[in-house]
Structures are given as structure tokens and as C-alpha cells.
Image: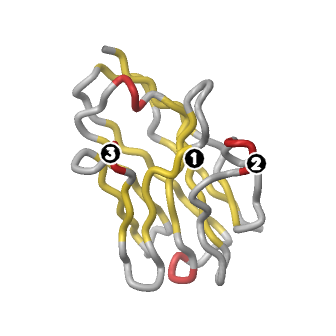
Amino acid sequence: HVQLVESGGGSVQAGGSLRLSCTASGLNFDDSDMGWYRQAPGNACELVSTISSDDGSIYYTDSVKGRFTISQDNVKNTMYLQMDSLKSEDTAEYYCAAARRGSVLPPSLIGGMCRSSSSFGYWGQGTQVTVSS
């Protein structure tokens, strides 16, 4: 049974920092592409960042480049998202996701809703990030 558990969300003022964590059980990080999505009210689910299990390559959506850093600790089976220089537009529910072996993390979701499909793998329950200006 695979379980992803996020933590680290909260409220912070603009310019501040937060670090999200996603701890996985029942899953081998070496075999799974991992990533973070986010969804703000009224907005489509957005793929924020991914890290490849094949070569460690990293993707960031343009709006977070230079401010967010994704990493993972394969010993602890934990993925992180360090978020610096936070802006009010970063306010959203953040979800971690893991792709099954042979699958990829989708760039968009059905109906624009995070967690609307698990055909590719697994979702965490989400953690709220609120940035006040």
C-alpha cells in the first residue's frame, strides 16, 4: 500500500520561506518520478516541479524558477520543496505525487483538478500554503 504524506505548509508573509516535505511509504524512490502540484481556488491544477528517477533531471514551472528548489532523500524516502521569496500568487493547496514505474507525471489533470486521476500513480492529501502580502 503506497502512501504519500505532505507536511510543512502554513501561513507566511510575502518574501518568506517554507519547506514542504513528502514522505512516501510502500514506494521505491529509485523507481518513481516525483513531483509537486498546486491548486489555488478557481485555478487549474498546476505542475510546479518534478524530479526524474532516471537521471535526476529537474523541471520547474516558469513562475517558480529561481525561488523554489526540489530535492529528495532516497534514504528517508522523502521529497522536499524549498520555497523562498514567496509571493501571494503562490497561495494554493500543494500536493506531492509519485508516478508508478513506467508512468510519467501528467502536465495537466482531468477537469483541471489535482487528484482527479490516479492512473499514473499516487497523490498525497495536500498541504495548504498561504502567503499574505
Using the image, tell me which numbered label, if any, was put on residue 83: none
Q: Could you say which is closer to the camera, residue 112 or residue 20?
A: 112
Locate the C terminus by quadrant: top left
Q: Residue beneath label 1, please? A: 95
- For the point 28% across and 35% down, the residue is 17
Judging from the image, what secondary structure is the residue with disc 1 in? strand
Judging from the image, what secondary structure is the residue with disc 2 in? loop
Quadrant location of residue 87?
A: top left
The reply to whether the C-beta atoms of the residues labelled 3 and 2 are less than 8 Å apart is no
The reply to whether the C-beta atoms of the residues labelled 2 and 1 are less than 8 Å apart is no
The percent coordinates of residue 88 (x first, y second) are 36, 23
Q: Residues within 10 Å of mark 2 (few under 14, many from 20)?
A: few
Q: Residues within 10 Å of mark 3 (few under 14, many from 20)?
A: some
Quadrant location of residue 132?
A: top left
Badge 2 or badge 1: first in the primary sequence: 1
Q: Is residue 6 above or below residue 132?
A: below
Judging from the image, what secondary structure is the residue with disc 3 in? helix
Mark 1 to mark 3 CA distance (whole Å): 15 Å
Badge 1 or badge 3: first in the primary sequence: 3
Give the residue type that dot 3 points to.
Val
Q: Is residue 125 above or below residue 15?
A: below
Quadrant location of residue 85?
A: top left
Give the residue type that dot 1 points to.
Tyr
Mark 3 to mark 2 CA distance (whole Å): 23 Å
Using the image, tell me which numbered label, if any, was put on residue 64: 3
Using the image, tell me which numbered label, if any, was put on residue 116: 2
Q: Residues within 10 Å of mark 1 (few under 14, many from 20)?
A: many
Q: Could you say which is closer to the camera, residue 20 or residue 84?
A: 84
Mark 2 to mark 1 CA distance (whole Å): 12 Å
Left or right of 85? Residue 120 is right
Badge 3 or badge 2: first in the primary sequence: 3
Give the residue type that dot 2 points to.
Ser
